[in-house]
Amino acid sequence: MNGKDQGWLGARFTRMSTGLKMLLILSAALLPLGIVAIWASVHSAQEKNAQRRDELFARLAIKAQRLDAALSRAELTIGTASAAITSAPNSRAVCENTLRRLERGPVPGHYALYAAGAELGCASVGLVVPARSVRAPHGGTRVEIMPDGASLRLSVFGESGALEGITEFDRAALTELTYIPGTSRNFDLDLVQGGRTMVLRRDFADGPLIRTYRGSEAAAGGQLGLRMTLGVQRIGTVDFLMIVLPVLMWLFAAIIGWLILQRLLLRPLALVQRAVSAYRPGDRTVALPHVASPAREIGDLGTAFEDVVRTVARHEADLEAAVDRQTRLVREVHHRVKNNLQVVASLLNLHARGAASEQVAAAYASIQRRVDALAVVHRNHYAELEENRGVALKSLISELAANLRATAPASASGMAIRLDLAPFYATQDVAVSVAFLVTEIAEYAMLCGSRSVAIALDEGEVAGTATLIVESDSLRRDTPCDEAISDRFQRIVTGLSRQLRSTISREESEGRYSLAIAVVEKAERG
């Protein structure tokens, strides 16, 4: 099993290009360095992520402390202002002055101050508060996020449980309060109380290289929760460079190695390869370029190919001469066979003229027609040998029709032969069978007193075939003819169709025979 795997891998490696092999070798050599560099970068990134996580929780605690400090300062200020309003003779004026100072404080907000009599002393414009003070049994403070989540309300109660004042901070003021200058703004910050949430910041942008950390811190004595979501980049710029550096080293090494290999070996080989690809069989020489390469083997390769080209050219010349001699010999054979068949046909014609009876003369004429048909095939095959396309069926059947008219007996001298032939070519074997088939049908029409014979050759239903159609009134079922002649005709026609590896379709009511024949080419109509 292992041997097979090694053989398969070895075969794949052998088929690779030289440049790809060089790249794989350099990659394997630099792989340990890359692994060590990547491991060190990942370890450094993990340590930095842990450090950023600790910074997150430290910053979250600072934000909670800032919020607590602002709430404590507001509580102390309200308590002091409430006592001052209660003891002042002109409490209304004192309340309004105190309210303006509170609104211009470090954390902008809206305030409402109550006197000791539980009456509303004064309130910021737009702040909705109860007209009379509510009470809390145990005093202290109460912090709540408003239902719309747009503001945070602080209610301060005195030791007696009476409401001393209300402070309401909007979202913008708390967002500015909880932001630590000099730090990134890429984080989410929410103030949470039960089912209510005040969104203080929504600037966190997640990404494929961002690691998300979440933390929470209690504020306002546990009445509120400050929740923070922060993203830390998994791989910093330095870490990224540490990972990319070995990759760059690998690329530079691969490129330098490839350039050297390309300049000294691959480019000269490509020039030789293009010259070799441009070579075509029959060329006597190959135009090899001048190769400037220190690799002497490349020049030797070009010289060896030139020697091979000269040897191949010499052998091709010998083969061309042999083929030419063979072609002339085949032409001569067909020519002599055609001449011999014509001599035989002439002798049969002479014997027919000197025959003692019409039956003997008819027998000689029948044999002569078949010899003529075979001679016509050889003559047409001889004519097409130069282009080697096969036998032209149109010329063959046309010549056969002329010979059949010339050798027709006196009783059939008026029989017409009509032709509609497409220019197809066929092999010699097919042409011989077609010639005999046409001769048999035409002679049968002559002997049975037919008035005409129509022969057509058209496209077949299957590619590479043509359809031969013969129509004659002698082929109809009700045409009177000698039974012996009809039986012999049917046997011969059936045998010829088998030689053509086809089946004759007989439409005896119309007097039509048709069959498919194999063809090798169709010429352009001229």
Image (spheres, helix red, strand yellow):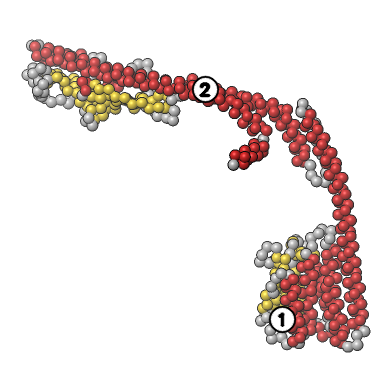
Above or below, 133 relative to 517: above
Task: Say which element carries label 1.
Answer: helix
Q: Position of residue 424 (x, y in %)?
A: 75, 65
Q: Position of residue 6 (x, y in %)?
A: 62, 38
Above or below, 480 relative to 107: below
Is any part of residue 453 visible from this angle? no
434 to the left or right of 100 = right
Q: Which mark is residue 37?
A: 2
Instruction: Kindly report which numbered mark, 2 or 1, lies closer to the viewer in this rendering.
Output: 2
Is any part of residue 206 visible from this angle? yes
Above or below, 497 relative to 34: below
Task: Say which element carries label 2.
Answer: helix
Q: Which residue is more in the foreground, 239 or 391?
A: 239
Alpha carbon distance from label 2 to label 1: 95 Å
- The amino acid sitting under disc 2 is Ala
Residue at position x 71%, y 67% in the image: 466
- The amino acid sitting under disc 1 is Leu
| Residue 10 occupies quadrant | top right
Q: Residues within 10 Å of mark 2 (few under 14, many from 20)?
A: many
Above or below, 465 relative to 496: above
Residue at position x 11%, y 18% in the image: 158
Q: Which mark is residue 475?
A: 1
| Residue 387 occupies quadrant | bottom right
Q: Position of residue 193 (x, y in %)?
A: 23, 28
Q: Position of residue 446 (x, y in %)?
A: 79, 82
